[in-house]
Image (cartoon, helix red, strand yellow):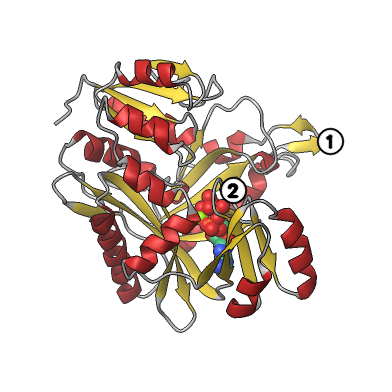
Amino acid sequence: MIGPGKAIGVLGGGQLGRMFAQAAQSMGYRVHVYEQSGPSPAGAVADRETVAPFDDAAALEAFARTVDVVTYEFENIPAEPLEAVARIVPVRPSPAVLSICQNRWREKAWLKANGFPHVAYEEALDGDIAPAVERLGLPCVVKTADFGYDGKGQMRISGRDDLARAAAIFRARRCVVERWVDFEKEISVICARTGEGETRAFPAAENLHESHILDVSIVPARVPREVEQAAAALAAAIAGRLGVVGLVTVEMFLCRGGGLVVNELAPRPHNSGHWTLDACETSQFEQQVRAVCGLPLGPCGLRSPAVMVNILGDAWAWAGGAVAGEPDWSRVLREPAARLHLYGKPEPRPGRKMGHFTVQGGDLDWSLGLALELKSRMRAGAGPTSG
Ligand SMILES: Nc1ncnc2c1ncn2[C@@H]1O[C@H](COP(=O)(O)OP(=O)(O)OP(=O)(O)O)[C@@H](O)[C@H]1O
Ligand SMILES: [Mg+2]
C-alpha cells in the first residue's frame, strides 16, 4: 500500500489531472505533475510541476525519483519513456495497458482477440481506404489510429465523394475504417480495479455528443435494467482481462434492437464521469487514487440522479475570433441544485473544455430540464437575468 503522505506522479496536466490532484491532496497525498507545456491546469493545484517534453529522459527520470507511484491522465504518452519510468517506480495502469488503449489498431485487435463485442472495422494505411469501405459498406467513419480525441482525426464517409477527400486527408497515416453504427444510445461505464483483482463499476452514464464532443452525461442512463447490468459486467470483464490497476472507461454503443458494442477504451478517469464528484458516494478521481495506491475501493452508489453539462469555449461570446464576453456564472451559481467546476484555463477557445456543471438532487427529468435551461441561460449574451 502506498499510504497517505506519499507522493503520486501524474503524467499530463489537463483537467483530469487537476481533479485527480485535488482528490489525492484531500486524502493527504502529495502530487507531482509532469506536463509538456506548462503552466497547466493540474500543475496549478499540484505540489510540484515539471514542464518538459515526454522524450526528455533526464527530466522524466528526475520526476520518477521524486514519487512513489505514477499514473497518467491522457493517452498520448510515448511507450519508451513510460517504460523507463516504470523501471524506477510503479506505473498504474501499466505501460502495456496504455499501449493497447492509445492506438486504435491495437485496441480493436485486442477487443477482437479477447472476444469483446466491437464495431466492425478494417485497418487502412496511407489513405488507401476504398477497399475497406467496399467491404464494410457505407456509411463508415475513418479515424486516425493514433492521437485522436474529441472527434479530432475523424471523418464520416457517406458517399463516393468523401472517399477522395479522405484519401487526401489520411495520406501517410495509420487509420481504422469503422462501420457507422446507427445506435440508439451511447453509454459509458468507468470501472476501477485493484492490484488484487477487485473491480467496482460506477453506474452507466448516457452520453449526448455535439460535434463529436461530449455535451451532456445523464445518470442513470435511460436504458433497461438488463442493459445497465450487461454494461457493468462488460466493463468489469474488460478491466479484468486488461489487468488494469486503476480505472478503465469503456465507451459503448447500445445498438437498435439491443446489444452493446464497445466504441473505445480509456485507461483513466473520463469526462463522462465528472458527475461522480457531486452525485456519487466516491468520485472517479478518489477511486483512481484508491486503486493506484492499493487502498480499499470506495462505494459507487449514486446519491441521486445527475446531469453533467460540459462548458466549452463556445459558451463565451466571440467577435472576429476574439473573446467578447464571459458566460454568466451567476446563472449556475444561484441554482442550489447545480455545482460549477471550472478548470482554471486562462484562454477559452471554441471546442476547448473549460469546465462543467452538474445538476443533482431531484428526479432525472427535472435535473435534465434544469441542466439544459442553465446551459442556454449561462451562455454569454443569453439575455438579462430574469430573477
Ligand atoms: N462507428 C461509429 N458509428 C457511429 N458513431 C460514431 C462511430 N464512431 C464514433 N462515433 C461518434 O463520434 C464520437 C467520437 O468518436 P470516438 O469516441 O471514437 O472519438 P474520440 O476522438 O476518441 O472521442 P473522445 O475523446 O471524446 O472519446 C462517438 O462518441 C460517437 O458519437
Ligand atoms: Mg470517445
* Image quarter (top left, top right, bottom left or bottom right) of the N terminus: top left
Q: Earlier in the sequence, mark 1 or mark 2?
A: 1
- Residue 374: assigned label: 2
Q: Residue furthest right?
A: 320
Q: Position of residue 326 (x, y in %)?
A: 69, 32
Q: Amino acid at mark 2?
A: Leu
Q: Residue furthest bottom?
A: 257
Q: Position of residue 40 (x, y in %)?
A: 52, 24
Establish if 146 lies above or below 138.
above
Tell me: is circle 2 under 8 Å from ligand 1: no
Is label 1 or label 2 in front?
1
Q: Nearer the viewer, residue 371 or 118?
A: 118
Tag 1 near tag 2, CB within 8 Å: no
Tell me: is circle 1 under 8 Å from ligand 1: no
* Image quarter (top left, top right, bottom left or bottom right) of the C terminus: top right
The residue under the point 29% across, 31% down is 86
Q: Position of residue 236 (x, y in %)?
A: 26, 59
| 171 sits left or right of 335 in the view | right
- Residue 63: assigned label: none
Q: Position of residue 299 (x, y in %)?
A: 21, 48
Mark 1, residues whose alpha carbon is within 10 Å: few (<14), some, or many (≥20)? few
The residue under the point 37% across, 43% down is 278
The residue under the point 50% across, 43% down is 357
Picture quadrant where residue 4 is located = top left
Q: Is residue 174 visible?
A: yes
Q: Amino acid at mark 1?
A: Ala
Query: Distance between the Cα atoms at labels 1 and 2?
Result: 23 Å
Quadrant for ligand 1 reads bottom right
Mark 2, residues whose alpha carbon is within 10 Å: few (<14), some, or many (≥20)? many
Q: Which residue is mark 1?
A: 319
